[in-house]
Amino acid sequence: ASYAMLQALTGVRYDAVDKTLYIDSKIGDFTSFISTGTGFGTISLKNGKPRLEVLFGSIDVKKYNIFGK
């Protein structure tokens, strides 16, 4: 349930097949926890620019899709 709240507010969703990270923030700029099957860390959005910091494992992102602001 906690992850659902993070996803609802930040719109962060990772597609491991396409290696795409989707962001559709309802709250503007943010920093949030992200966890995937291969790693975890933080994802930030500031002034429309994403920043992924992997703290353990790996999260292979080839593309960011950023929607609404």
Image (spheres, rainbow, N blue to C red):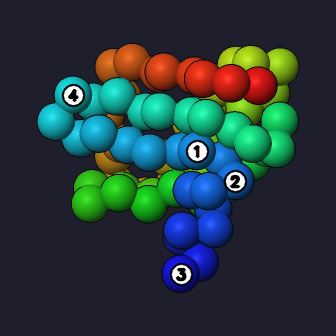
> Residue 23's x, y, as percent?
56, 34
User: What's the residue type where badge 4 is placed?
Assistant: Asp
Q: Secondary structure at mark 2?
A: helix
10 Å neighbourhood of mark 3: few (<14), some, or many (≥20)? few
Which residue is label 3 attached to? Answer: 1
Q: Are marks 4 and 2 in contact (CB under 8 Å)?
A: no
Q: Secondary structure at mark 3?
A: loop
As measured in the structure, the alpha-carbon distance from the residue carrying label 4 to the one carrying label 2 is 23 Å
As measured in the structure, the alpha-carbon distance from the residue carrying label 2 to the one carrying label 3 is 13 Å
Q: Earlier in the sequence, mark 4 or mark 2?
A: 2
Residue under the point 72% across and 32% down: 45
Query: Mark 4 or 3, which is nearer the eye?
Result: 3
Image mark for residue 18: 4
Which residue is label 2 attached to? Answer: 9
Depth check: 2 or 40 in front? 2
**Any part of residue 58 in sight:** yes
10 Å neighbourhood of mark 4: few (<14), some, or many (≥20)? few
